[in-house]
Amino acid sequence: MSSSSSSVTVATPALPVSLRGVGRTFPAVRGGEERIVLRDIQLEIAPGEIVALLGPSGCGKSTLLRQISGLDRPTAGTLTIDRTAVAPADQRSAVAFQEPRLLPWRTVARNVELGLPRGLDRRQGAERVAELLELVQLSHAAGLKPREISGGMAQRVSLARALARGPGVLLLDEPFGALDALTRLTMQDLLVDIHRAEPATIVLVTHDVDEALALADRIVLLGTRHDRPGATISMILDVPGARPRDRASVVLTRLRAKLLDALGVPSHHGA
Amino acid sequence: MSFDERGGAPVRRPSTEGRRSASLFQFVSGYGYSAAGRDLPEVSRGRTTVTTILLGLVLPVLILAVWWVAAESGAIPDYLLPSPPQVVAAGVELAQAGLLATYILISVQRVLLGFAIGAAIGLVLGALVGLSPLASKLLAPLLGAIRAVPSLAWVPLLTIYLGIYEEPKITLIAIGAAFPVFTTVAGALRHVDPHLVEAGQAFGLGRLALLSTVQLPAVVPSIVSGLRLALAQAWLFLVAAELIASSMGLGFLLIDSQNNGRIDRLFLAIILLGVLGKTTDALVGLGERALLQRWG
Ligand SMILES: Nc1ncnc2c1ncn2[C@@H]1O[C@H](COP(=O)(O)OP(=O)(O)OP(=O)(O)O)[C@@H](O)[C@H]1O
Ligand SMILES: [Mg+2]
């Protein structure tokens, strides 16, 4: 993948993110019990850092991402981006949701357009969109409607939309989940390229241990202790090495074993 | 830099998995809906359209034939059942007197005007009730009650307030046309995919931009079907409206023919109402298809 240096510059500098004692409890509905989903999340993310959030399904990864994006408010603790409190639907960050969430009546290109920053003139906007579509290898699909493209293509459109404004904080919820193995690797490399060209602080939710190892500076494991409700950070791993990384390196192999072990999966590694 | 290392919840994976893949949860997680797999609306090809039209004509033609035979055979006296030629003759007679075109035009005009006004009001009320919970609580019960009033019940009141000319008639038709639009639009707006609305908000759309970018486009198909229902309803209310001291129109033709025992004209009026209603509906249907291609 070629470098993604852009001709239309909209990128804002990467911003630090800070989570202090963040918790989210959903109130009881009709006689049920309240649901403690997240508790005591403590995390400082440096500007330009890539953090991978890993954890079992339903543990609250998407919920945590929603707190950072300002689409949901924590019931405990404070969240800041660049040292100021996260606002509702904070425009300093951009999200690629777990589901593509494309407007079905708009073409792929017009969907990406939705992510553009305000105040970009028409021509610049069109240029930026074309560039992003090229980046996610969808130039050929620019004129198609969401119902005419595959799930993996839709995810890439959603990624392009999130990238469109060059956000200071990029929140990606399993952005490559629906992609086939090969496209996924290409997209991971692409993300590395994009990050180099327009460094943003990235929080990446993933189920894929290898993906986390290939992309992240740090891997944050969310987990629930059996004696306490609510998921919190159970482990933070620093991943050494500059990207792109040799996926087969000894260090990564050892880290993978450690992660799988922490996730409760036997790694069958060298014993 | 590790906290509690044993915190990870245990997750099982199929034992056949080797270490080749570290993709643990791929099979657990639902990756949302992809748009793929939803069928494109069937584009009607020339032949299927012709077949459809021909099939639709089978029963009317059959009924016409039976009617004709029944009337001509003399089994039923013609003061109860006029023959098709008699009905046609009645039409020709009215046309020669210059009345048929006038009646049709005035009725069509009333329907279209009442429909336009009613649809506009229905759209505004529907948007209010669909978007604002407060407006919904304020308006929905009242509108529900107004809606439950049968069309004929308005006639005396409208006559007293608005006189006997066009105003009460068009008002009545507008009342009839407003409700289908109101109901469908309010319902549809309330059920716009919250995921899409949230995505719009996430990308910085304010209330108005959200409305024009996400919510309204999302309900275009409902608006169109609401409009279609409203048009049908407008024709239904036309006859009630033309009970109000009219001297023209297809509803008047019905009343007048009943009073004069002109069963051939009664048949003519009923057939014209059916044909005109179906024709306007078909025209809206064409518009609907074009719109759905764009917004569907
Ligand atoms: N609005 C809500 N009201 C009540 N409970 C909620 C709400 N949103 C999420 N939850 C609960 O929070 C928990 C975490 O959900 P979340 O979507 O964050 O999980 P996740 O880690 O992203 O899972 P997955 O990997 O399957 O996407 C779930 O048990 C869910 O039921
Ligand atoms: Mg999730």
Image (cartoon, coloured by chain):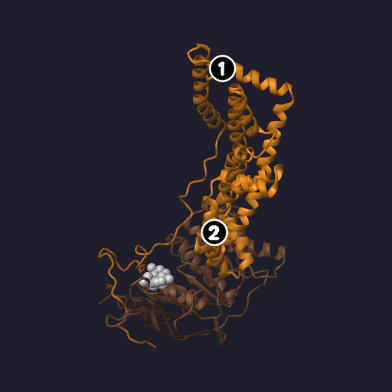
Chain colours: A brown, B orange
Where residue B132 sits in the image (x, y, percent)? 56, 65
Left or right relative to B96: residue B3: left
Whether residue B192 is visible, yes or no, is: no
Where residue A173 sits in the image (x, y, percent)? 46, 70
Where residue B94 sits in the image (x, y, percent)? 69, 23
Can you say whether B174 is above or below A74 in the image?
Answer: above
| Label 2 chain ID | B
N-terminal of the pair, mark 2 or mark 1, is 1
| Label 1 chain ID | B
Q: Evaluate whether label 2 is on the same chain as label 1.
A: yes
Label number found at residue B83: 1
Can you say whether A229 is above or below B179 in the image?
Answer: below
Q: Indicate the secondary structure of the residue bearing disc 1.
A: loop
Question: Mark 2 packing: few (<14 Cα in 10 Å), some, or many (20+)?
Answer: few
Please tell me which residue lies in front, B244 or B92.
B244
Type of the residue with mark 2: Leu
Q: Indicate the secondary structure of the residue bearing disc 2.
A: helix
In percent of the image, x 56 and y 79: which residue is there?
A87
Q: Regarding ligand 2, which quadrant of the image does it lie in?
A: bottom left
Give the image quarter of residue B199.
bottom right
